Amino acid sequence: MDITLTPSAEDYLKAIYEIAKEKKIVRIKDITDKLKVKASSVISAVKILASKDLLVHEHYGYIELTTQGIAVGRELYERHLVLYRFLNQVLQVDSNIARKDACAIEHYLHSETVDRVIKLLDFISAAPNNEPQWVVKFKKFLDTGISECKYAKTLDQLEIGKTATIKSINIKNELRKRLMDMGIIKGEKIKVVKKAPLGDPIEFSVKGYSISLRKSEAKKIEIEEENDAAING
């Protein structure tokens, strides 16, 4: 937004824009009622906005936004809605608190920050049922205090003598095929037999066969250790 406005002036312009969306004409009293402020404060704000060619107001007449005033007012209004949605729908803040907090922070966020919030909301909306699993889990965590999110453990972190279940193999092309031919597939049990003095390579046991992997290869294989499975179960 090219026009520089104080936070207070932005609030007034946004309020006028919102009123104009519902009514054909905007009066001083409409703004005082909406913002719960004195008429003298509204008149001062209107004069400032008029001096910036954002609105037209004849003495004791109706208030009408200019084309530029509509554009700026719409931007302020949409920015507020974005922040409200983020606070209320993503962070699960109470609607009344989210509305007040959106008003409080909307004046101070960089446009890039607001743009990232918009992209996050678009990302969430693109998920099935408009709600990714991590949002569902976050809601459950807020309600119960129980977190279902776990940091993925990789095969290189498994200690000697420990057994784990392979959860995913984040490797492509020929190496992935070679590992699968060796028995390293999703759902298979794997055990650390020994590690080289410097921790590389690492020897594993899969289906009774011994397999050596570089640490960099093992790091790309996600696992669930047996102790973790017992706890999560």
Image (cartoon, rainbow, N blue to C red):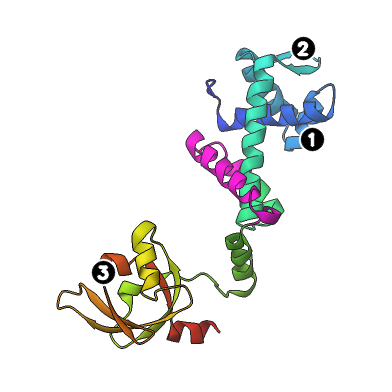
Of helix, strand and loop, which mostly describes the magenta segment? helix
Type of amino acid under label 1: Asp
Q: CA distance from mark 1 to mark 2?
A: 19 Å
Type of amino acid under label 3: Lys
Q: Quadrant of the N terminus?
A: top right
Q: Is residue 139 above or below residue 205?
A: above
Please rate how many residues cluster around mark 1, counting C-alpha atoms within 10 Å: few if below 14, some from 14 to 19, many from 20.
few
Q: Residue furthest right?
A: 24
Image quadrant in which you'd find residue 41? top right
Mark linked to residue 59: 2
Residue carrying label 1: 33
- Indicate which disc, 3 or 1, sits on the residue closer to the N terminus: 1
Q: Nearer the viewer, residue 55 or 157?
A: 157
Across and down, in percent, residue 126 comes to 64, 48
Across and down, in percent, residue 63 comes to 77, 18
Please rate how many residues cluster around mark 3, counting C-alpha atoms within 10 Å: few if below 14, some from 14 to 19, many from 20.
some
Image quadrant in which you'd find residue 180? bottom left
